[in-house]
Amino acid sequence: MSVLFYRRPDYVAKLPGPMNLSQCQIYVDRTQKHRKAIPSELSFENVVQDRALPPCTLQDFMDYLVYVSHDAENLQFWIWLQRYTAKFNALAPSEQALSPPYSAPEAVQPTGSEANQPPRSEKSRFGVSEYEITFDQQEVPMTPPGAMSPQFDKQSFISGIANTNRSMVDSVDDANAQAGLKWQSFTIQPFRSEINRVISHYIAPNSPRELNLSHKTRSAVLHALQHTTHPSAFALVHDIVEGTLRGQSHPNFIRWSICNGNKPRVLFVRNSGIAHIVAAVILAVFLVCSAASRWWRIWCFPLLFVGFDIGIAAYKGLCVIIHTGHSRALRPWEQYGDGASLDSFDNSNDDEEATVGSSTDEVYSMSTPRNGGKTSSRGISMDTFGTSNTFDHELWVDKYRKKPLLQRIFTRTVWIQNETVRLLQDRIVMQSHVLAVLVTVPLTTLIVALPQTGVL
């Protein structure tokens, strides 16, 4: 990986409207062009398996999706499906036989102008106009659910007691009705109650963590889930969610993680760079117009160099001063301990904090305990079933809003544990040094060569 020509992953903007496979393929095609920008140590597999050190852990990824990109439901659903698949495959053959793999009805052959449309993928299930996503990465094996312990702490308790105006059954029935499905699902199938909870949380319209699916995709998935609880019923939505995570969320997360400063700090450093450049110009004008020797103008060099150096680094989200210690500024939600309180969920509105009622199903915790088995206490983002991913109720929000600007700029820092992130930051800072020299040397030479006016 070249030092001088390294570039952070390009920002991948969200495409408008509900997601489908063809749009996800656009995400994947974009990121394939910049694969060298993300080292293998920071790959999607390493992040979701929690094999990367901070600031690129699974918790960091989830925090980014909750607090920055506001689409954490994709990762929450995706991790649940990986563990549900492992749990289903661990069933006895007799129980698995009750929920056979889903095979979609064959689509009607196109006629007329439809015959000229792009061919459907052989793996396209459900007979809808979706196309196959191709990934170079291998399938990610998730930790078996048996290795995870149910989390009976405050967050899981909140998830169980949070109120909603509609019951889980009503939510599923309404979703099936909107999809045109008139008959009830097979209740004898394994994990049917859990599947209903997933529908009411992620699939049904206006659900707490509704996935960004088109009406056609939602109807196809609900139709499949009426027939079986086999993981293959989620195949279409799995491809869409994984395509979004790999092609859009993960590259943006790595780009964001490389930055070591918060927004106030980066803007401050960027403006400081501009101030240094302006000061150099003022000094150059003064020396050119004075009777002083032209060699005094060389003092413009350090001002120009510092200005361009910290300005270029700040443009790429790095503060050179913090970088000297390989540290990063704490995120706002990392500065104030616990993020949620029981009182935050009382009298919640249906559209803001809606959730399903309690159930006897196991509430799966997505977090992998680290640091002596302690799990994150910031909200409920690592729970499969819970409220919507809003965070206005978290205690840090109000505290951070009241924090003075200078304290936001010069906030506490923490050492970056991930060696790969430190290496990428070193390369970006080295680039800023080289570019600053390449710009400053010609400008200083020009300033020294200007004729003396002697006006002052």
Image (tube, helix red, strand yellow):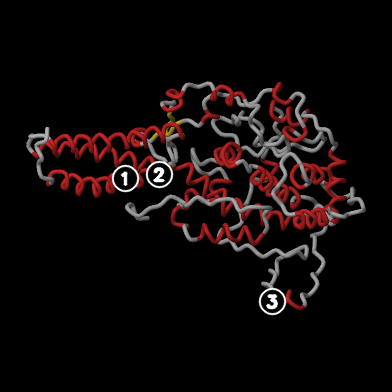
Using the image as rendered, state which of residue 194 and residue 190 is in the foreground.
194
**Among numbered discs 1 and 3, the one appearing first in the sequence:** 3
Give the number of the mark in front: 2 or 3. 3
Q: Residues within 10 Å of mark 1 (few under 14, many from 20)?
A: many
Pinpoint residue 123: horizontal percent, then vertical percent.
Answer: 70, 66
The residue identified by callout 3 is 116
In this rendering, is residue 391 above or below 7?
above
Q: Residues within 10 Å of mark 3 (few under 14, many from 20)?
A: few
Pinpoint residue 278: horizontal percent, then vertical percent.
Answer: 27, 36
Q: Residue furthest front?
A: 455
In the shown orientation, is residue 107 left or right of residue 292?
right
**Residue type, label 3:** Asn
Pinpoint residue 290: horizontal percent, then vertical percent.
Answer: 11, 34
In what element is the residue under mark 1?
helix
CA gap between label 2 and label 3 equals: 45 Å
Numbered label attached to residue 451 = none
The residue identified by callout 1 is 432
In what element is the residue under mark 2?
loop
**Among numbered discs 2 and 3, the one appearing first in the sequence:** 3
**Residue type, label 2:** Lys
Can you see residue 89?
A: yes
CA gap between label 2 and label 1 equals: 9 Å
The residue identified by callout 2 is 316
| Quadrant where the N terminus is found in the figure | bottom left
